Image (spheres, grey):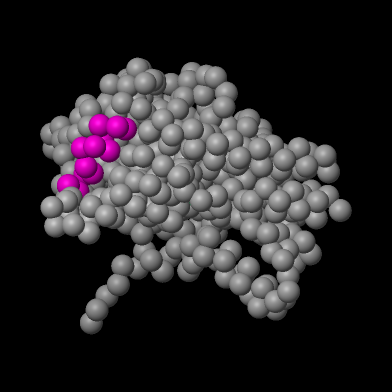
Amino acid sequence: MLTINENFIKIPETYLFSEIARRVNQHKAENPDAEIIRMGIGDVTLPLPEASIEAIISAANEQGKSETFRGYGPEQGYDFLRNTIVENDYKSRGIDIKPDEIYVSDGAKSDTGNIGDIFDISNKVAITDPSYPVYIDTNAMAGRAGEPNSNNQWNNIVYIPCNEENSFIPQLPTEKVDIIYLCYPNNPTGTTLTKDQLAVWVKYATENQAVILFDAAYEAYISEENVPHSIYEIEGAKEVAIEFRSFSKTAGFTGTRCGYTIVPKTLFGFTKDGEKISLNKLWLRRQTTKFNGTPYIIQRAAEATYSTKGKEQVKSLVEYYMQNAKIIRTSLEKIGLKVFGGVNAPYIWAKTPNGETSWEYFDYLLKEKNIVCTPGAGFGTSGEGYVRFSAFGNREKTIEAMARISK
Ligand code: MLT
């Protein structure tokens, strides 16, 4: 008899954004004329930078000629992209990252979800609450989260609440943990940590031989000083942290798929016997076995985002979305909602106006205003009573959505 991985039946039947899509489709089927404005999933709406399109066309032409055709590429990514990342994302900030510490992939969702492969399931995991659902769900699938409890939480996960009371600053756990997920600028709250606040976690990880899994997918949206763009800006982080980056939100690659992960060579885990093992080596083994590399054409498109033209085009994409964020923030504030985020991140985290649950307010916005947001409870227990608005929409629709809510 075939037996299944029963962890899959312990997690919610559908992934958060699939459940939202299901509800939206149902509403659309019942109201075919409804002009729905989508501010739910953080999916970009502007086209790819022109520089990337040119690179795609040129790389596609190369693939059409036998002299320049390429088959399997290196699983870790082509040198042209890894070297460009070193120069532009790290060297320019005074951070010493070597090309062979970079793993190019099909995005941060895959990498943050797959990274658990290299860690034993006995590790104690700490996750900020609310959080991007991939962190919890993938740990649950692996059996590392334990059992779900009546509070919709898992008995083996240490939840680090981030809420209004603690100004969305995660406090160190009181019990010892081994794996810590941090995402800054934060999805879903849009809030950030200063260098000193992040340094507290690096110190904790150093003292406890823990690893920080730092999701920096929204780094391009940082506008304020003293907000670290990379965890490696913090001294000692190269000994304790893995960093995930993505071209999805930076350059509109949500459907094009490219990201990368930094696994420093100075980062080690241990066998049960205490032998020190390089995490870079383990991730290399994992990727070369289970992943066959991001397509050449896509890596050329990602590389092009770092050209002079590419950088300007990326900057204007980011500015466009951040202008949307400002419109959302100020409109919601005007009608008396308490809002967070939206300054260094394309997400606005809003408290529901009359103490509704987040799904109640989600349903109200969908049914009465034809607006899709994301209910905070979908990101964890501490997200209850909040909803998230994405600033990745089209300008006119963003303005229209705010006008509908303000009415
Ligand atoms: C989100 O809306 O939280 C993100 O778009 C999801 C993702 O990046 O996979």
Where in the figure is residue 218, as x and y percent of width and height?
49, 38
Q: Against 15, is 229 above or below?
A: above
Residue positioned 72% across, 40% down in the render: 327
Where in the figure is residue 157, as x and y percent of width and height?
43, 47
Q: Against 319, is 10 above or below?
A: below
Residue positioned 36% across, 64% down in the render: 7
**189 relative to 37 in the view: left or right:** left
- In the rendered structure, which segment of residues is drawn in magenta? 74-85
- Quarter the N terminus occupies: bottom left
**284 relative to 130 in the view: left or right:** left
**378 relative to 90 in the view: left or right:** right
Q: Is residue 47 visible?
A: yes
Name the one closer to the observer, 318 or 405.
318
User: In the displayed image of the protein, which residue is found farthest to the bottom?
Assistant: 1
Name the one closer to the observer, 26 or 212.
26
Q: Against 39, is 3 above or below?
A: below
Where in the figure is residue 177, as x and y percent of width and height?
37, 36
Residue positioned 69% across, 64% down in the render: 36
Residue positioned 20% across, 30% down in the render: 265
**337 relative to 258 in the view: left or right:** right
Q: Against 39, is 269 above or below?
A: above
Q: Is residue 233 magenta?
A: no
